Image (spheres, grey):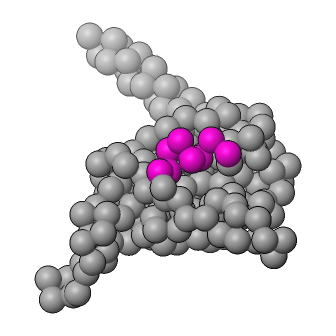
Amino acid sequence: MRTGRLVILGIRILLLAQIVWLLPGLTGCASRERELPFETIAQENGWLWGRYEGSKSALLILTGSEQVSTLKEVMKHPALIETQKGQLTVYSELQLADVDWGTYFVLMALQGEKGSSGYKVTIHRIEQRAQYIKVYASFEEPRPTEKVSDRLTSPVHAVRIKKDAHLTGQQIEFSLIVDGATVAQTSQRIP
């Protein structure tokens, strides 16, 4: 009986030693979270970029110039701007014309359609872990004493993010997180 307990104790000690020996190697394999730097392209209430008519929040990922022209299908009634050459162009297309799509992709956080002005979406931090990107943002609402217009708005914050070896060629799952809750998700391959 006593020998059996000693054998079991010896096996437990061996298992514990193996776990302690393997643990540092396992933690080295785990993917680490890293913060992605970003640059704001635009942050406004949707009067210039157009209105996203969905009532729920959304994330849009643009990876190439061909997607810029399809943005009009998602963002309705964008502003038209006269260029230096006297031509009218859609405001969002003008804002995205200088993006180097081989180097960057664009992420847009949308708060959803609102019944007045005074709303705002702000991206604070973007973090990546393996094929998952979390976009941490805040949504602001008008204060009760604030004067607002009754015009429909759709707050947007558009940023550009530099591609690198951790992103290029990957199918990435994006989550928009506001006040600790996931309010929108999308998936996009980053070429």
Of the pair 1 and 148, the residue shown nearer to us: 148
Residue located farthest toward the left when viewing the structure as drawn: 144
Q: Position of residue 36 (x, y in %)?
A: 65, 60
* Residue at figure coordinates x 32%, y 18% from the top left: 5
Q: Inspect the magenta stretch and tell me whether residue 31 lies in it.
A: no
* Residue at figure coordinates x 77%, y 55% from the top left: 104
Q: Position of residue 113 (x, y in %)?
A: 32, 56
Chief SS of the magenta region:
helix
Label count reads 0
| Quarter holding residue 6 | top left
Asked whether residue 91 is in view, the answer is: yes
Of the pair 165 and 66, the residue shown nearer to us: 66
Q: Position of residue 35 (x, y in %)?
A: 61, 61
Q: Is residue 158 toward the left or the right of residue 121 in the image?
A: right
Q: Position of residue 185 (x, y in %)?
A: 44, 41
Of the pair 103 and 26, the residue shown nearer to us: 103
| Quarter holding residue 45 | bottom left
Q: Is residue 78 toward the left or the right of residue 177 in the image?
A: right
Indicate the quadrant containing the N terminus: top left, top right, bottom left or bottom right. top left
Asked whether residue 95 is in view, the answer is: no
Q: Inspect the magenta stretch and tell me whether residue 71 lies in it.
A: yes
Q: Which residues are magenta?
A: 69-76
